[in-house]
Image (cartoon, rainbow, N blue to C red):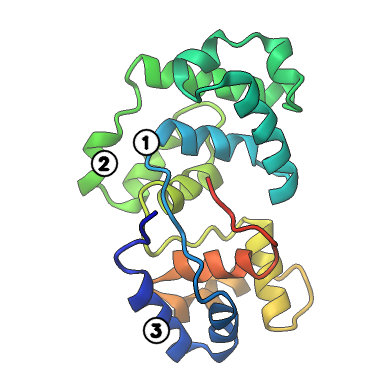
Amino acid sequence: MEKPVFWEKAKKHLIKKDRKLGKIINNYKYDFLYSKSDPFYTLARSIVGQQISVMAAQAVWNRFEKKIKKVNPENTIKLHHMSLKSCGLSRQKITYLKSLSKSFINKEINTKKWNNYSDEAIINELIKVKGIGRWTAEMFLIFNLCRPDIFPVDDLGLIKGISKCYDIDYPIDREQALKMSKKWIPYRSVATWYFWRSLDPIPVEY
């Protein structure tokens, strides 16, 4: 597992800029974000993780992986609705996973052309797929493409991590979070990952 090329540089930058965040970074010296590099896997896992805790998402995902054996669009589309339901997936998330599978099979999602796209251009492409909102697209940019400066301001874990780190009442509003995030530019993905890490015994992955 390789860490992103910018990871060590980002850590130094953030430690220098922000003492409190620096403390979290120093607590997890050997942990880092790593990409699964399979776009379908990341997006499917992000859909499963929508609006539930990291641990709940992990439990549902483990059951899904066990049932499907190999996570890919073809196997997901073939899996019966009841099999997916038995993994703990809601009707809505099952629809989203099927829709995502279709988009890959019909080549509506073509990740190869995204290398030269800006973050926003990729988000705009992804949110055309049913079940993919901005948050899911941002998870993809962080965990699959390893883009360094993504700040998923609507993520509850991130907001919780920020509130805990700076000892401020949860939840802080998005405007305050965005304002605070300015000092973590151009490595907001890394800052976000450490805020998540400070809350969970297992590193977040998609």
Check disc 3 and give the amino acid type.
Lys
- In the image, residue 191 lies at what x, y percent? 50, 71
Query: Which numbered dot is residue 125?
Result: 1
Using residue 105 as the reference point, say whether residue 181 is left or right of it. right
The residue depicted at 40 percent of the width and 46 percent of the height is 144
Sequence-wise first label, 1 or 2:
2
Sequence-wise first label, 2 or 3:
3
The residue depicted at 44 percent of the width and 31 percent of the height is 40
**Residue nearest the viewer, comparing 133 with 1:** 1
Tell me, yes or no, whether the two marked residues, 1 and 3, touch with CB atoms within 8 Å. Answer: no
- In the displayed structure, 174 sits above or below 63; it is below
Quadrant (top left/top right/bottom left/bottom right) for the N terminus: bottom left
Inter-mark Cα distance, 1 to 3: 33 Å
Q: Is residue 186 visible?
A: no
**Residue nearest the viewer, comparing 100 with 45:** 45
Tell me, yes or no, whether the two marked residues, 1 and 2, touch with CB atoms within 8 Å. Answer: yes
Q: What element carries label 2?
A: helix
Q: Is mark 1 on a helix, strand or loop?
A: helix
